[in-house]
Image (tube, coloured by chain):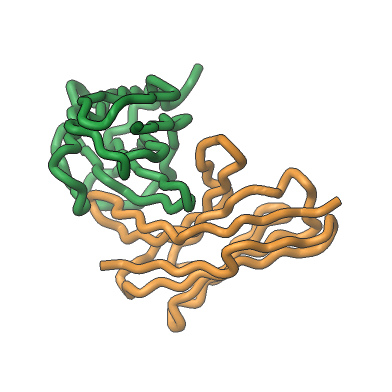
Chain colours: A green, B orange
């Protein structure tokens, strides 16, 4: 009965590889996000998607690309992985009311710990 | 853009004492201020939030105060318990079709038995 799920939970890979992290939410939310949490625990938003449109794109390298096949999924693709990409990546979702009628709680997934060797 | 600062970065209190964590924000347009708790190895979870039309909100042992003029808000935990030990994040956002959350750097709270 998980609300926001991510796979895999752990990902260990070599520099230069391409990898994907999947995220699914069953809450019926229409906005999904990707966050990066580094070793110092800083939590920074990377992307958000609403109705399949990218509406926030922080200054992340273009090696990172979010892909949303439908409203319930937002996957994160990372090309040419670098050592500095090692972090925990959290997916989140929220219900964004039309017309900005109110900001709502974000529900986070369990996180994916990415280690680049 | 919005910048959120948070203090202290670490906080140790004795069980039963109170804990206070303070945040400041820079964008006067921000009007939604949630607090998230992240236990070790787990996901962040919302514990309380406040909107700019309210100065204070309380939920059992947790309360949040907001001073819009000074652009700061605080989390107060009373009668702390060991299970309150976690990293706490404040965040600021504005009512916008996009929910641009900016999180503070976090406070690691340790409640000592």
Please state the horizontal and vertical placement of residue B3, each as a whole percent of the image. Answer: 35, 68
Q: Residue at x 25, y 27 (%)?
A: A75
User: Which image quadrant is residue B74 in?
Assistant: bottom right
Residue A113 vs B107, above or below: the answer is above
Left or right? Give the position of A17 relative to B27. left
Residue that appears at 30% across and 51% down: B99
For the residue pair B72 and B40, the one nearer the viewer reads as B40
**Is any part of residue A56 visible from this angle?**
no
Image quadrant in which you'd find residue A73: top left
Relative to A7, A63 lies left or right: left
Q: How many circles with numbers are drawn on the protein?
A: 0
Work out whether residue A27 can be spotted.
Answer: yes
- The front one of B34 and A90 is A90
Question: Which residue is drawn at the image coordinates 52% and 57% (left, top)?
Answer: B106
The percent position of residue B40, horizontal first and vertical second, equals: 61, 40
Q: Is residue A68 above or below residue B108?
A: above
Relative image position of residue B52 (x, y in whole percent) = 43, 67
Closer-to-camera residue (A40/B16): A40
> Seen in the image, is B12 located left or right of residue A24?
right
Which quadrant of the figure has residue B63? bottom right
Q: Nearer the viewer, residue A31 or A117?
A: A117
Report the side of A44 relative to B110 (left or right). left
Residue that lies at the very extreme toward the bottom in this rendered image? B69
The quarter of the image holding the C terminus of chain A is top left
Residue at 63%, 62% in the rendered image: B10
Is A64 located above or below residue B94 in the figure?
A: above
């Amino acid at each position: 009965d998980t609300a926001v799920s991510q796979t895999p939970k752990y990902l260990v890979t070599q520099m230069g590889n391409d990898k994907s992290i999947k995220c699914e939410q069953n809450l019926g939310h229409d906005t999904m996000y990707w966050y990066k949490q580094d070793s110092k625990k800083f939590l920074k938003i990377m992307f958000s998607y609403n109705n399949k449109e990218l509406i926030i794109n922080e200054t992340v390298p273009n090696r990172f690309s979010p892909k949303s096949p439908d409203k319930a999924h937002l996957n994160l693709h990372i090309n040419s992985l670098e050592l500095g990409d090692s972090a925990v990546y959290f997916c989140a979702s929220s219900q964004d009311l039309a017309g900005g009628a109110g900001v709502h709680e974000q529900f986070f997934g369990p996180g994916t710990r990415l280690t680049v060797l | 853009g919005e910048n959120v600062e948070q203090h202290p970065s670490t906080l140790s209190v004795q069980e039963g004492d109170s804990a206070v964590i303070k945040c400041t924000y820079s964008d006067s347009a921000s009007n939604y201020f949630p607090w998230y708790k992240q236990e070790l190895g787990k996901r962040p979870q919302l514990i309380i939030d406040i909107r700019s039309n309210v100065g204070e909100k309380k939920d059992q042992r947790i309360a949040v105060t907001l001073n819009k003029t000074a652009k700061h808000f605080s989390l107060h935990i009373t009668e702390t318990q060991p299970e309150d030990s976690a990293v706490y994040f404040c965040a600021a956002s504005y009512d916008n079709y996009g929910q641009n959350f900016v999180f503070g750097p976090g406070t690691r709270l340790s409640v000592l038995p």
